[in-house]
């Protein structure tokens, strides 16, 4: 990858230095069309999904619908120690002749620890970075390597896809964990609770890392498991009997609900 000319890069940061201190819009400003200045790079294969796995726990699912490689890693102010996993952003660039100037939507699926050169730095998948380009200019846009962008946080919308739970490979009859995927709206959770078969007594889970939530159980805590999910804006839904009795670790199970 070839970096943006150094002089232009410096001018960019001088011009936007007063804007980069902006904070993410709150839930109440979703859809306000207020964009802030940021920085974008890309990583992984040119048309790939960045890194398979990532710091949010979604593994290969970042490549497949509904994420479809439209993902990004965020620096500390975006990743938020894992609380930023699942947040959605519109990002656009305006550098002619490469950029279309039209916003694309990405989901935060990974962390970029080395992206400390700007307050808000998106390290996008190669596929997502190229999606900002005019037709036929995606390769040329990637050759810039780094460029100025505008971004805003927006509600997530995975259309007809419901929330999914990927069972952690370390799950046993004494300990259970799952990564939660495809949450519409805020894309994150204030709390996650789990109930065993036939019970309405939901027990709090702890956030282990990224979107992975865990709970200590005992053999009497039998599947199928249900989940009560509360988003960061206080909306609560119940996903009933998502994890079947004979679940397989590493397997993903779709619920019938979303925000």
Image (cartoon, rainbow, N blue to C red):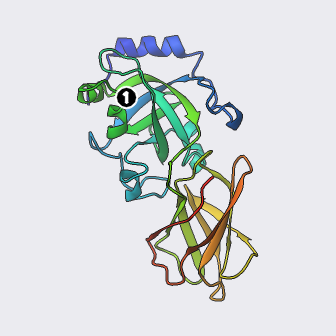
Residue 98 in picture, x, y percent from top left: 30, 20
Residue 234 in picture, x, y percent from top left: 74, 50
Camera sees residue 59: yes
Using residue 72 as the reference point, say whether residue 88 is left or right of it.
Answer: right
Q: Which image quadrant is residue 221 in? A: bottom right
Residue 53 in picture, x, y percent from top left: 40, 56
Residue 40 in picture, x, y percent from top left: 42, 29
Q: Element under label 1?
A: loop
Instruction: Report the residue at 27% width, 29% height from top.
Output: 138
The number of numbered badges drawn on the structure is 1
Nearer-the-camera pick, 164 or 10: 164
Vertical arrangement, residue 39 with respect to residue 43, above or below? above
Instruction: Report the residue at 48% width, 58% height from top.
Output: 57
Within 10 Å of the Cα at label 1, are there few (<14), some (14-19), or many (20+) other Cα atoms?
many
Using residue 244 as the reference point, say whether residue 130 is left or right of it.
Answer: left
Which residue is outermost to the front?
160
Residue position marked by numbered label 1 in the rendering: 132
Instruction: Report the residue at 51% width, 38% height from top.
Output: 75
Instruction: Report the residue at 27% width, 41% height from top.
Output: 47
Q: Looking at the figure, which quarter contains the N terminus?
A: top left
Camera sees residue 113: no
């Amino acid at each position: 990858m070839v970096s943006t000319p150094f002089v232009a890069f410096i001018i960019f940061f001088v011009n936007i230095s007063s804007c980069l201190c902006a904070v993410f819009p709150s839930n109440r400003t979703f859809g306000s069309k207020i964009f802030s200045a940021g920085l974008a790079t890309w990583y992984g294969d040119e048309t790939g999904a960045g890194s398979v796995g990532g710091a949010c726990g979604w593994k290969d699912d970042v490549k497949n619908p509904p994420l479809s490689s439209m993902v990004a890693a965020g620096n500390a102010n975006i990743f938020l120690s894992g609380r930023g996993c699942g947040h959605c952003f519109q990002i656009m660039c305006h550098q002619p002749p490469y950029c279309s100037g039209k916003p694309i939507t990405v989901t935060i699926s990974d962390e970029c620890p080395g992206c400390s050169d700007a307050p808000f730095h998106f390290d996008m998948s190669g596929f997502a970075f190229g999606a900002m380009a005019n037709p036929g200019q995606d390769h040329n846009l990637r050759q810039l390597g780094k460029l100025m962008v505008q971004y805003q946080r927006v509600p997530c919308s995975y259309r007809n896809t419901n929330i999914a739970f990927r069972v952690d490979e370390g799950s046993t009859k004494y300990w259970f964990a799952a990564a939660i995927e495809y949450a519409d709206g805020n894309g994150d959770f204030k709390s996650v609770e789990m109930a065993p078969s036939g019970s309405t007594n939901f027990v709090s889970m702890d956030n282990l890392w990224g979107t992975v939530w865990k709970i200590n159980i005992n053999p009497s805590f039998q599947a199928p498991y249900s989940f009560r999910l509360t988003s960061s804006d206080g909306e609560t839904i119940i996903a009933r009997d998502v994890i079947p009795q004979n679940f397989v670790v590493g397997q993903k199970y779709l619920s019938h609900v979303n925000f």
